[in-house]
Image (cartoon, rainbow, N blue to C red):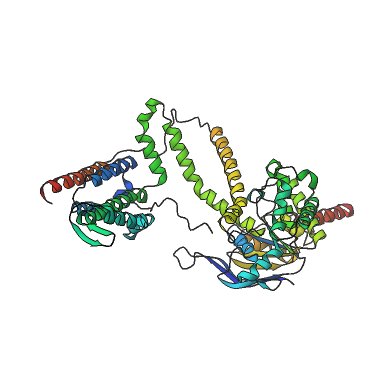
Amino acid sequence: MLNDITLGQYLPGNSAVHRLDPRTKILLMIAYIVAIFLVEKMPAFIIIAAFILAVTLTARIPLNYLLKALKPLRFILPLMFLFNLLLVRKGNLLVDWWIIKIYDEGIKNAFFIVLRLSTLVVGTSLLTLTTTPIALTDGLEKLMAPLKLIKFPVHELAMMMTIALRFIPTLIEEADKIQKAQLARGADFESGNVIKRAKAMLPVLIPLIVNSFRHAGELAMAMESRCYHGGEGRTRMRVLKLQWGDLAAALITGALIAAILLSQRFLF
Amino acid sequence: MPIVVEKLSYTYMQNTANAHTALDDISFTVGDSEFIGLIGHTGSGKSTLIQQLNGLMQPTSGRVLVDGYDMNDKKQRAKGRALIGMAFQYPDYQLFDSTVFADVSFGPRNMKLDEAEVKRLAAEALELVGLDPAEMMEKSPFELSGGQKRRAALAGIIAMRPKYLVLDEPMAGLDPGGRRDVLELIARLRAELGCAVIMVSHSMDDIARSAERIIVLNNGRIRMIGTPEQVFADTAELTEIGLDVPKPMQLAAMLKQRGAAVPDGLYTEESFIEWLGRAVKHA
């Protein structure tokens, strides 16, 4: 019943993009976002699109995954487009019919915002498509290490994220079993109004929450009995190491930013 | 009327690359108040099969008739499901309400009975499993001990007065004493309520002790079906699919190897001990 939920969208692979250090990928994603916000002229989006396409092909990710990444935006994108189209009152008036006034600036703005948002989402989805959630948390922990100086619990936060990710499949499986157990006792999750249905979920949610507390207790015990005492002096199984590929990726992303800036200055 | 399973097959994730046939052409019947043991290796399809019985999963092909109600039909399914009480492996999957009594009442209440009847059924069920109904009015299910939780969960099922009791490894994670308690409880419930029992278990000894008929599943197919005598007689076949024979039979086989004249069919502890007593007396 619940097994069609996909969590984390990691696509296993062994491409050059997959093999990049997670730290590199996180930092380059930030650079990529900056690049998108540097775009001021529409044609520069061609450069961004070419970049996305190149990364996708290198990572051997099917192109339809890019469209899938846009799916959560299927309502917000048309809405943003319409708002900008109808509400921007600048430039030359093109259409003036009843209460609808469309200006050329509005059309430009509408396309611009849609392009910016979609490239943002599609580009960043490449990070989660090519990096395992565990590698991502590892990378984040390393990147946030300087925050330890101001007593920010970096390691604890990363450990919490790792554990949370680890337990998502377990909890889904449990929710499914609990739901079946209650169905077998005649529970009805499908009829009635919203309030009735929400109430009908209680017999599933309560055991689920109780069980997750139990899991947490057991896990804490298991970790302590293996001498876990926090991040102090802890070594890692997978040591992150920068490679030549990381340098290459950084240079390519740098080239992307340069291309956008230069082309806007001299080309478009 | 019985449960009739007809040519039932089930494929997980059909029409995808990960398609996996869990059940393949399964047919059998469960007679009234019969005790059926369902055994098989992990992944043999036991859990999938019992979920088909009360329509929690629908077959890819074939059908299940519960007292004539076709479980493939959405309307008839609700009626068929009401006849089947199903207990899952762990009580923690089921207990949720603020008191044990309220939790046991959940099933009967879903059957839309009037309040007095719900109370009567819940109290009776609690008494049957050996819990005090008055005490359980105040106790939260989460305060119970492991063994009590199992009893409370069973009470929640039998409060619905099922004609068929389906148990998925009801003894999982219990020590031998706890296993015996639960087995005895199941036997008592069956005697008092006259319900049929379909029990999945990993333990050949538990199955040998209780079941009248045994179904052996292997790779989604019925490999053997018959009385304990018939099934356990074929040790070679059971070993081949990775299953054991009951411990008394293992012991009997060892004794035979050393030249003792042990008769066949001593598959429960009781019968073995009885034979041993007689043999020692004669010697």
Residue drawn at 74 percent across, 69 percent down? B31
Front-lying residue, A185 or B191: A185
Quadrant of image for the N terminus of chain A:
bottom right
| Residue furthest right in the image | B281
Q: Quadrant of residue B267?
A: bottom right
A260 lies left or right of A170? left
Does residue A57 show up? no
In front here: A24 or A3?
A3
Residue at horizontal 18%, vertical 47%? A260
**B232 over A28 or under it: above or below:** below
> In the displayed structure, would residue B141 be above or below residue B197?
above
- The reply to whether residue A246 is visible in this rendering is yes
Outermost residue, left side: A266
* Closer to the camera in the image, A265 or B177: A265
**Callout count:** 0
Horizontal and vertical percent position of residue B66: 69, 70
- Residue at 43% across / 33% down in the picture? A155
- Residue B260 x/y as whole percent: 78, 56
Provide residue B72's location: percent of width, then percent of height.
Answer: 60, 71
Q: Position of residue A90 (x, y in %)?
A: 21, 51
State whether residue B265 is above or below residue A17: below
Kindly indicate the quadrant of the structure image that contains residue A153.
Answer: top left
